[in-house]
Each structure stands twice: as structure tokens, then as C-alpha cells.
Image: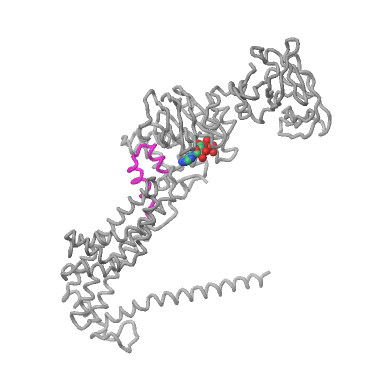
């Protein structure tokens, strides 16, 4: 088990700047999930840590040891590849003990480690099979098994569940969570899946265009996204954004856009900086748009809207609303018995309202 | 419904009969000359032309075989050929497998030009290479030696082998090697433990190609070898033509005997030719 430090990591493919100064520190035993849109450099970052990609600039430390020039085989890292990369000419067992055989461990030790891993992953029945005789989920478990028998310093997972169906993915997610508790390992895990990120992560690293946007616990990045990108990326369905302008009247900030206008209380937006005339974007999650419900004191006043479309998801319902020309999405308890086209009253929950500067896209609210 | 089914079945039957008739015809066309040679080799006397069309001629005898093995250096020639051919095949395939790996996996200046150069060297007729080969082998003082032959042969089939192997390596996902690196092998180890075992179909094709071309080669051997003790069987058999007044029986017997090693190699390597080993390594 080990710590990992990325220091000002830069990666260029020719003229293409893929990573631009990534600075992340990972503690011992930490489960860090890296998320970001496709092509933002997640895989590249993992591959650089594994030693499969050259480092254009910056330094990587594993357990305080500079590994920039260290051969992949010497880094004591296990990687579960985006495509599982099982050795097709070896049985499941040989796949799993390949690294151990290379290290010439005693036979009994190899056997017991493989037995342990295959017990955890329920692979006992498949040990003598070839990879092509396995289903996708089984292959994926072999890939994980191959990693855990090695007892490496750091585990790297690159979207390991992305090709599984929803049900299997859920099962494997729980398995990985259990595995983490059991191994108590340092894990870097790349995913596109919000749920995987929120449930598995100790900390989430959100990347965009090769730049780390925010690092924090799942609840931190959800509650206090530092910029518009993180706010829009984390959370599903996506946060509503309302662009507008601030004015200050009698000491109270007022947000007004073309279609709506509401006061922004000081506990949301302390008036530390000059707010008058500032172009901002208001962010409010669909869960915090209250429809036809008394708001209470920490909510905005009533806003009149029109219901356009309802989507029943089971226990929740998505309401597509329109306030003037502004579209808003609200998520409410099922069943919301109104027909499309009817007028509804809604309000914003101030406790979870975010204000971002329009120009810098940075969060300016508390 | 039923009549329709039988009509379809009938059509299938006709199709398969026609197909098999065609295949049989081709097979007969291929095998016929071989059978004629067999029958010539068994014929008493040195009759090449005979009105007899039976496969085993009347008074069949193994006299030609015993004369060939007893009176000539045929066994020695076979041995020379076998030695040169096997050495050529192993050296050719090992050189090609590593060179192809470099062409497939590494980026280096002149990579594309190199591949094209290799291909274009295959377009030069073999006859044109005789003179330069002769000069090189003479300079190396390897005239009339096994080594000279082995070098000449393994070098000349290298471009083809490299192309075959490079094409095959390109289909093996890179992540397999990367997984091996992360698991603790060196680059060479990954090549040895992952790439080579997965490439057996292409390796055996390259081996067969090397083997058959070297086994049947005549021109280069004619130029490099000049003492009959060093001859390969191709030279030796033609020796029979000049030395005696073409002994067709022995010639045919020799032709039959030299097919045996080739046959064995083909039968043995067929089991390595099974393709599709990379299936199931990566998802999707
Ligand atoms: N070998 C390469 N040569 C050139 N460009 C590359 C290479 N590998 C990756 N890139 C580029 O680097 C960028 C980041 O790629 P990377 O694979 O890290 O993305 P990712 O975040 O893992 O995306 P995804 O979520 O789709 O897997 C992409 O724009 C890609 O085009
Ligand atoms: Mg990726």
C-alpha cells in the first residue's frame, strides 16, 4: 500500500496538450475516483502512473519514490485495463498467477493466493477455462483477480465496468466496494458513471481538458462545486443554469434575468465583493426546485411557471417547466397529478443554490 | 410446403454434387503427375514413355530406389538439403520474428521506407540476385559451404516472412503486452511470453515458406556449390541427368523420396496453423 503524488504532470502527444499540470496527492489506503468527459486524459494519467506512457513534464512519486524513469515492471502497480487484456493463450488460472510465476514465488504461496482471489471473485469453477470461454462479466472478474493476487502497492482501474449491463455493473460495483474494504488498498479508479463515482470514491478528481477542476469528497463536489463545469458534470439529472445579472438594492442582492427575478440572501452570497451589475449564472439542482410546495423561510418566493412535460421514473418524476422563456427541470416525488400545460407555482431552495461568475465560471456563492 | 422443401433440398444436392465434381477434377489434376512419377519409379528398365497406363506397372520393382540409394550419393544430398533447409528455416524465422516485432511496435525513422524497401526487394526476379549473391558469398569465402547456402537462403526469404509476421503482430492488441509489462516482464519477456505464443499460425506459415523455398531451390545452389559431396538433392538429381544418359527410373525415385520431408513438415505444422487464438482476450 502506498501514497501517490502527481506533481505538475504535463502530457503532450505531438502538439496536442492532453494533460496540463495535474497536481494530485493520494493518501495511503485511499479510493480515488477520476471522472471527466471522454478524451479529457483520464486513461493517459493512469498509463503514465503505470509507466506505459512517457511523462512529458512533471514528476510522479509512488511512496515518495520518483518513478518517472522506472520501468513498469518495477513499479509494483496492478492495472485493470479498459479492455480486460487477458492473455488469450493462458487459462484463467495461468492468467491470474502469471505475475507470481514471473516473480518465482514458491508454489504453495502462488496456489494459496490464487485460491484466495478466486474465492473472493467466485472464479473457482472457471480456473481451467480459456478467456474466450468466459462471459464479459467473468472476464472482468478475471482481470480484477489478476490484479489482486499480486498484492500491489496501487491498483489502477480503467472503466472496468463500462461494458457490463446495468445489473451486472451494479453487482460488480458492490463487489469492488467490498474488495476495497477487504484489501484496504490504494485505488485509482476511472469511470464515466456518476453512481460509481459517488458510491465508491473516498475522493473524486474531476478533470476537463487535461486540467483538474476539483478534488474533494463526493459530498463536497456535489454540494460545493467550484465552477460551472463541475456543477454541470456532477449530479444527475444535470443542474439547472439560469444566466442573469446581480443588482444590489437596500443591501440585498437581487438576481434578475429576462424571465425571473429573485433576491439572493446573504447566507448564499455574502457581499464580500462588489456584486452590483455582475453577470452571473445561477445554479439549482432539479431536486431543489420545489413545485407546488410551501417553501419555508430558506426558500425563494413563489415563481410562476408552466408544466410542459412529465416523466415518471417510478418513485420520482421529472417535470420540465418553463418560466417565461427559461426552461427548468424539477425532480419531485411521484405522482405529480397535473396535466401538461397547467400553471404551477415553484420556488428555489436557497440552501442548495449556487451562484457562479459568468466570465470566470468560478463559484462565488458560499 | 413439402414439395417446396424437397425442391430446395434437391437444389442443394445438385449444388453440392457439382461442387464436389469440380473439386475432384482439380484434385485429380494435381495428383495425376505425382502418380505418373510413382509409376515411372516402379517401372523395370528405364522407360519413361510407355503405353502402359496402370498405376503399378507390370513387373513393378524397387530396383530404381535401391540403385539410387546404393550407387549414388543421394542420401548424402538429402542430408545436405535437410541440414541447410532446417537451419535456414530456423534462422529465417527467428530473424523475421524479431525484425517484424520492431516494425510492428516501435516508432523509428525510416520505418515506412524500410517496409516498402522490403516489399520491393520481392519484386526483383530471383535470377537477378544470383550475381550479387555469388559475389558476396565469394567475398565471405563461403563458397561450397553449408554456411554460405544458409546465409543466402535465409536472407532471401526474410522480406516475405517479415511482412507476414508484421501483419499478424499488428492484429494483437497492444494492451496484452502492456498488461505483461505491468505484471512484471521486460519488453523482451513480453515478446517471448505473449507475442510469440500468440503468433504460432503466422510463425508456422513463415516457417513453411522458408522450408519449401529452401528445400526446392536450385539456382543459388548451382552457383554456390561445386563439389558433389556438398550438393543438395536438387543439384544431385540433375547430376543423374548428365552423368548417365538420364536415368528416368532413378530420377523418379528421387523425386518421390524428396517429397516425404515436405509432407511431414506440412502435416506436423498444420496443427499450429489454427487461427483465432487471440479471441476472447479483450472485451467486445
Ligand atoms: N497515443 C496517442 N497519440 C496521440 N493522441 C493520443 C494518444 N492517446 C491518447 N491521445 C489523446 O489524448 C486525449 C486523452 O485521451 P485519454 O485516452 O486519456 O482520454 P480518456 O479521458 O481516457 O477518455 P475516455 O473516457 O473516452 O476513455 C485524447 O484527446 C486522445 O485523442
Ligand atoms: Mg479512457
- What colour-coding does the image apply? one colour
Residue lying at the far right of the rendered structure: A342
Residue lying at the far bottom of the rendered structure: B51
Q: Where is residue B147 in the image (x, y as percent from the top left)?
A: 20, 59
Q: Nearer the viewer, residue A71 or A133?
A: A71
Q: Where are the magenta residues, as a range?
A: B176-200
Q: Position of residue A178 (x, y in %)?
A: 51, 28
Q: Which of B4 and B34 is in front in this view?
A: B34
Q: In which quarter of the image is residue A38?
A: top right
- The chief SS type of the magenta part is helix
Residue A140 visible in the current orientation: no
Judge whether residue B192 is colored magenta: yes
Q: Where is residue B102 in the image (x, y as percent from the top left)?
A: 36, 48
Q: In which quarter of the image is residue B156?
A: bottom left
Q: Give the residue displayed 59% in from the left and 31% down from the top.
A: A194
Which corner quadrant holds the N terminus of chain B? bottom right
Residue lying at the far front of the rendered structure: A277
Q: Quadrant of residue B260?
A: bottom left
Judge whether residue A231 is colored magenta: no
Q: Is residue B152 above or below residue B53?
A: above
Residue B156 visible in the current orientation: yes
Figure label count: 0
Q: Give the residue displayed 31% in from the left and 36% down from the top.
A: A104
Q: Where is residue A299 in the image (x, y as percent from the top left)?
A: 74, 17
On screen, residue A133 versus residue B107, left or right, reads right
On screen, residue A332 versus residue B52, left or right, reads right
Q: In this view, does A50 lie above or below A255?
A: below
On screen, residue B154 versus residue A132, left or right, reads left
Amino acid at each position: 500500500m502506498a501514497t501517490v503524488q502527481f506533481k505538475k504532470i504535463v502530457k503532450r502527444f505531438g502538439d496536442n496538450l492532453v494533460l496540463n499540470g495535474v497536481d494530485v496527492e493520494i493518501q495511503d489506503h485511499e479510493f480515488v475516483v477520476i471522472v471527466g468527459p471522454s478524451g479529457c486524459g483520464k486513461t493517459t494519467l493512469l498509463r503514465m502512473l503505470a509507466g506505459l506512457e512517457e511523462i512529458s513534464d512533471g514528476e510522479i512519486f509512488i511512496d515518495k519514490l520518483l518513478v518517472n524513469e522506472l520501468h513498469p515492471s518495477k513499479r509494483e502497480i496492478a492495472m485493470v485495463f479498459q479492455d480486460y487484456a487477458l492473455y488469450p493463450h493462458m487459462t484463467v488460472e495461468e492468467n491470474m498467477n502469471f505475475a507470481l510465476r514471473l516473480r518465482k514465488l514458491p508454489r504453495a504461496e502462488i496456489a494459496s493466493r490464487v485460491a484466495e482471489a478466486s474465492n473472493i471473485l467466485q472464479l473457482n469453477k472457471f480456473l481451467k477455462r480459456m478467456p474466450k470461454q468466459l462471459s464479459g462479466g467473468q472476464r472482468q472478474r478475471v482481470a480484477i483477480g489478476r490484479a489482486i493476487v499480486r498484492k500491489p502497492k496501487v491498483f489502477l482501474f480503467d472503466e472496468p465496468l463500462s461494458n457490463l449491463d446495468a445489473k451486472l455493473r451494479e453487482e460488480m460495483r458492490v463487489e469492488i466496494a467490498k474488495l476495497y474494504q477487504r484489501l484496504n488498498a490504494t485505488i485509482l479508479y476511472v469511470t464515466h458513471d456518476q453512481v460509481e463515482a459517488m458510491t465508491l470514491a473516498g475522493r473524486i478528481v474531476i478533470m476537463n481538458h487535461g486540467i483538474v477542476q476539483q478534488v474533494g469528497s463526493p459530498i463536497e463536489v456535489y454540494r460545493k462545486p467550484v465552477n460551472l463545469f463541475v456543477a454541470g458534470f456532477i449530479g444527475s439529472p444535470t443542474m439547472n443554469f439560469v444566466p442573469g445579472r446581480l443588482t444590489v438594492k437596500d443591501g440585498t442582492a437581487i438576481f434578475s434575468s429576462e424571465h425571473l427575478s429573485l433576491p439572493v440572501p446573504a447566507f448564499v452570497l455574502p457581499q464580500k465583493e462588489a456584486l452590483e451589475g455582475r453577470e452571473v449564472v445561477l445554479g439549482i439542482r432539479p431536486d431543489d426546485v420545489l413545485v407546488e410546495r410551501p417553501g419555508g423561510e430558506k426558500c425563494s418566493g413563489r415563481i410562476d411557471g408552466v408544466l410542459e412535460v412529465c416523466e415518471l421514473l417510478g418513485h420520482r418524476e421529472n417535470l420540465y417547466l418553463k418560466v417565461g422563456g427559461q426552461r427548468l427541470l424539477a425532480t419531485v416525488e411521484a405522482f405529480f397529478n397535473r396535466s401538461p400545460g397547467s400553471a404551477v407555482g415553484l420556488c428555489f431552495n436557497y440552501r442548495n443554490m449556487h451562484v457562479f461568475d459568468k466570465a470566470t465560471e468560478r463559484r462565488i456563492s458560499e | 410446403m413439402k414439395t417446396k422443401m424437397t425442391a430446395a433440398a434437391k437444389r442443394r444436392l445438385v449444388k453440392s454434387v457439382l461442387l464436389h465434381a469440380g473439386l475432384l477434377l482439380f484434385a485429380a489434376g494435381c495428383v495425376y503427375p505425382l502418380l505418373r512419377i510413382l509409376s515411372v519409379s516402379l517401372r523395370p528398365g528405364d522407360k519413361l514413355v510407355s503405353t502402359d497406363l496402370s498405376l503399378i506397372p507390370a513387373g513393378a520393382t524397387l530396383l530404381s530406389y535401391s540403385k539410387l540409394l546404393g550407387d549414388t550419393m543421394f542420401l548424402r544430398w538429402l542430408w545436405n538439403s535437410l541440414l541447410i533447409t532446417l537451419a535456414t528455416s530456423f534462422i529465417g524465422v527467428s530473424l523475421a520474428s524479431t525484425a517484424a516485432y520492431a516494425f510492428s511496435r516501435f516508432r523509428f525513422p525510416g520505418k515506412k521506407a524500410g517496409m516498402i524497401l522490403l516489399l520491393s526487394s520481392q519484386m526483383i526476379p530471383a535470377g537477378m540476385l544470383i550475381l550479387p549473391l555469388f559475389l558476396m558469398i565469394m567475398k565471405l569465402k563461403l563458397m561450397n559451404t553449408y554456411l554460405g547456402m544458409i546465409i543466402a537462403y535465409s536472407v532471401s526469404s526474410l522480406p516475405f516472412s517479415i511482412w507476414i509476421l508484421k501483419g499478424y503482430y499488428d492484429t494483437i492488441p497492444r494492451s496484452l503486452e502492456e498488461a505483461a509489462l505491468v505484471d512484471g516482464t521486460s519488453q523482451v519477456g513480453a515478446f517471448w511470453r505473449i507475442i510469440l505464443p500468440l503468433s504460432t499460425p503466422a510463425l508456422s506459415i513463415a516457417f513453411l515458406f522458408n522450408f519449401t523455398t529452401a528445400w526446392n531451390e536450385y539456382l543459388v545452389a548451382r552457383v554456390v556449390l561445386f563439389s558433389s559431396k556438398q550438393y543438395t538433392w536438387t543439384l544431385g538429381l540433375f547430376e543423374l541427368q548428365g552423368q548417365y544418359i538420364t536415368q528416368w527410373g532413378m530420377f523418379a525415385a528421387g523425386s518421390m523420396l524428396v517429397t516425404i520431408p515436405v509432407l511431414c513438415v506440412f502435416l506436423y505444422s498444420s496443427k499450429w496453423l489454427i487461427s483465432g487464438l487471440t479471441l476472447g482476450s479483450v472485451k467486445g
